[in-house]
Amino acid sequence: MRAGNEKGEGRMGTVVGLLFFVAVVLAIWNLAPPFWADYNFKDKLNEFARVGRHKSDDEILRMIMREVSDNHLEGYITGNTCKINTMETRRVIRCEYDRTVDILPGFKHTFHFKDEADQPVL
């Protein structure tokens, strides 16, 4: 029941605000997994870069590709997208890949991830 001086206005603003809130939550829901997978992958690259010189670059690449599989990045990262450069005192690993994400229905964006690990070899 409404009082005599209430007109019932403002409902449209509530609906628009609610739709906006749902859109933001959905966008975060769709954006979080790719960025979380990249964060975990980058952390593992740093770990692999610190592996001792007893491991060859090919062995390191196999370790990276196993991690790619564990993080479900197979469609984005291949053996050609990662470069490993082992020097006397350090190892540099660079991986670049693109990943297209459906942020909202009908709205896609391609993110370019460029991960680099430069660590001293232990």
Image: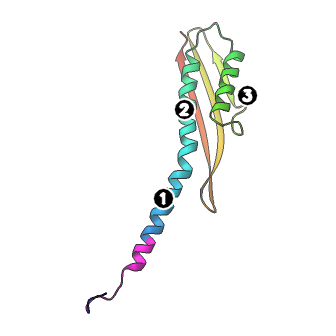
Q: Which residue is drawn at 69% across and 27% down?
A: 65
Mark number, residue 79:
3
Residue identifier under label 1: 24
Q: Quadrant of residue 117?
A: top right
The relative height of residue 36 versus residue 86 in the rendered view (above or below) is below
Q: Mark 2 and mark 1 in contact (Cβ < 8 Å)?
A: no
The disc at residue 57 is none
Where, quadrant-wise, is the N terminus in this rendering?
Answer: bottom left
Q: Residue 40 carries which label?
A: 2
* Residue 6 within the segment the image draws in magenta: yes
The residue located at (51%, 62%) in the rendering is 23
Q: Which of these two is toward me, 108 or 2?
A: 2
Q: Nearer the viewer, mark 3 or mark 2?
A: 2
Measured as percent of width and height from the top left, residue 28 is found at 50, 52
Question: What are the residue bounds of the magenta stretch?
Answer: 5-16
Residue contact at pointers 1 and 3, CB within 8 angstroms: no
Residue 51: x, y in percent?
A: 58, 13
Looking at the image, which residue sits at the far front? 1
Identify the element where label 3 is drawn: loop
The residues tagged by marks 1 and 3 sit, at their Cα atoms, a distance apart of: 35 Å
Q: Residues within 10 Å of mark 2 (few under 14, many from 20)?
A: few
Q: Which residue lies furthest to the bottom in this view?
A: 4
Disc 2 secondary structure class: helix
Residue 8 lies left or right of residue 43; in this view the side is: left
- The amino acid marked with disc number 2 is Asn
Residue 47 is one of the magenta-drawn residues: no
- Around disc 1, counting alpha carbons within 10 Å, would you say few (fewer than 14), some (14 to 19), or many (20 or more)? some
Q: Residue 39's spot in the image, x, y percent?
A: 53, 35
94 lies above or below 59? below
- Mark positioned earlier in the residue sequence (3 or 2): 2
